[in-house]
Amino acid sequence: MTKFLKNEKLFTGIQDVPQNCHTYRDDSKIAPEDKHAEFMFFPAFTGQIKPSVPKITVEGNCFEQVSFDMQWDETDPSVFTIVAEMGMPRSLTCSDAFFFANTEIHHFEVFAKRGTHTLKF
């Protein structure tokens, strides 16, 4: 289970699917018998932000260009900010949802508008 959540292991039967959020949600790339694979309700792992790697860029289901930049100050280690940049939406009515978590917080955020969004934890 841990290897799957860290994106080190794929579901049985979909090893040929490219590793990004958008293609995981493309049903045409998944064999019919694998669409109901165990744990398919979990979000696809898109990346890990940490002080040593403060910025990542991914492709979302709605937004083709998504980046997350973590801002953290060593003088106040209990507070950090994530600046999310959403760009190039595939349609006017789509949205992307991301789950942010560490050992102390769990946060679910839906992004429906392009532009810069700031999340303070």
Image (cartoon, rainbow, N blue to C red):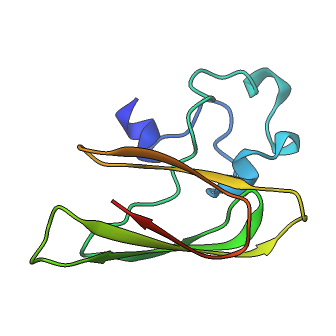
Residue 120: image quadrant is bottom left
Q: Quadrant of the N terminus?
A: top left
- In the drawing, does residue 88 fall left or right of residue 85? right
Which residue occupies 84% across, 26% down?
32
Q: Position of residue 121 (x, y in %)?
A: 33, 59
Which residue occupies 68% across, 38% down?
14
- In the drawing, does residue 74 fall left or right of residue 32? left
Of all residues shown, which one is farthest toward the left? 75
**Residue 26 vertical placement versus 74 (above, below):** above
**Looking at the image, which is closer to me, 16 or 114?**
114
**Looking at the image, which is closer to me, 21 or 107?**
107
Q: Position of residue 38 (x, y in %)?
A: 59, 21
Q: Position of residue 43 (x, y in %)?
A: 57, 41
Q: How many marks?
A: 0
**Looking at the image, which is closer to me, 10 or 105?**
105
Which residue occupies 72% across, 73% down?
114
Which residue occupies 47% across, 41% down?
9
Residue 53: image quadrant is bottom left
- In the drawing, does residue 17 fall left or right of residue 117? right
Q: Position of residue 69 (x, y in %)?
A: 43, 77
